Amino acid sequence: MKSKITFTINIVLLLLVTSLGSCKKYLDVLPKGKKIPTTLADFEALVRDEYTNHRAPVTQAVLLLNDRWESQTTLNGNPLWKVNYYWDANANRIDLNTTDESVYYTAYAAISTFNLILQYAPAATDASDADKNQLMAQAKLGRAMHYFILANYYADTYEASNASSKLSVPLIESAEVNAPHKQVTIQEMYDFIISTVTEAIPNLPDKGATVVHGTKGAAYAFLARVYLQMNNYDQALSYANQALAVNDKLFDYVAFYNSYKAQIDLADNYPSLPNPRGYNYVENYIMMHGEYVYSRREWPLRADRAARFETGDASLLSRWKSRLVGSETYFYAITTGYFNEGGITTTEVYMIKAECLARKNDLAGAMDALNTVRAKRILPANYVALTAGSTKDAIDYIRRTKENETLFNIVSFADVRRFNKDPLYAKTFTKTENGATVSLKPDSHLWTMPIPLGAVKNSGNGTIQQNVNQ
């Protein structure tokens, strides 16, 4: 599939690779070089650029959650990684964030591309108004998805009581070099995301040219994600139902496991099974890569993270296998391919629906949505349909499945931050590292990542205020 949707584009983007010594502004992004886009095909080619526009390298969030295993050697060579992985609340991450700025600059490079399309595609040649409107609608959705990542990585989580007084990240709608920008409030950012995606929906297609092209279903699913993050359960449920009306398919991991069981169960064998969670994953609404855009193995899991899967979860059994290397035990990935680590799937939307129903005290409906997913995940010998006696019980069950299904995605990080604001659901993470017990508290400043110093000190035509103290 990658060969079908990735090809050389004869346009050179001045990307955002800014360091402390750089004189470039972080918003100085403008297409230059061999060809200036003029036709709709030129602009559409930008949408197909997966590396620039469809990648969400939320590395530090994944490390903070301890959702992937990292070797001591790797951590020692990456100080910021080590701080987040070991939950070192005393370290100054602002100074260390000169070594890992990829989330910020990747997102703004993509935003610049989508702004370019929105600004210049209306004058594109050889295209109907309907075709131009569709491409611009897809640009609005793509841009909003990156702003959601930025807002939930570099700013505090959404709370209606203070969203209008806390700052988010810079908002820019222009593709011009050195365009003025404003660091908006969290409320302003969410209002922008919702309004632009909502206005895009009528012009989005039912089916995209590829899995990275936005569709109505993808927009419904994304708005369900956004409204859930705002604790607006009525709207989140409405959009979840609209998304599931478009696509409610689930991948059968029980069948997948059974088809490869002989290889998986073979002692000391670590196969390279085909990854089902790529371009053609039946659950995809829209695809977005994680750190990398090439075929590889999935990230390894910490042993304590693997333990948070249900007994008999065929997804775990099909994707990872316990491995001892030296004195370290971790779960080695046994699938290879391309991974939809940053996009949206039907399972996420089922879990959104389940939580919203639980919040509205429809416990039977919530468990029905959850069990619909679990039936495709849990081996028959271990499967028992779950019931819940309270909203708290239901949401605890839903969280377990959703956290496992959204591994390496901004959603896992955003969900924990959201739950941390509610004393009923907030929890302290505790583990043992190198013989010492360490904890990550719900109110820790580590839950918000520092904006890169390169952006703060070279902020273009505007100012940027750091959102954390260290």
Image (spheres, grey):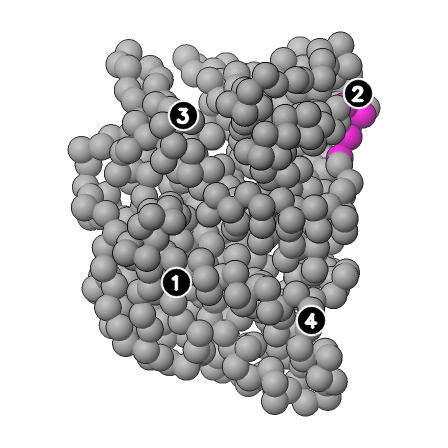
Residue 441 versus residue 310 in the image, above or below: below
Residue type at mark 1: give it: Glu
Sequence-first tag of 4 and 3:
4
Which residue is identified by label 3? Answer: 424
Q: Kindly tell me whether residue 106 is visible in this rendering.
A: no
Of circles 4 and 1, the one toward us is 1
Viewer-side residue, 113 vs 152: 152
Disc number at residue 188? Answer: 1
Marks 3 and 4: in contact by CB < 8 Å? Answer: no
Please report the bounds of the magenta region as a residue range.
Answer: 251-255
Residue 22 versus residue 466 in the image, above or below: below
| Residue 298, image x, y percentages | 58, 35
Viewer-side residue, 78 vs 130: 130
Which residue is identified by label 4? Answer: 203
| Residue 397, image x, y percentages | 57, 22
The number of discs equals 4
Disc number at residue 218? Answer: none
Residue occupying image coordinates x 28% and y 49%:
450
Q: CA distance from mark 2 to mark 4?
A: 42 Å
Q: CA distance from mark 3 to mark 2?
A: 39 Å
Residue type at mark 3: give it: Leu
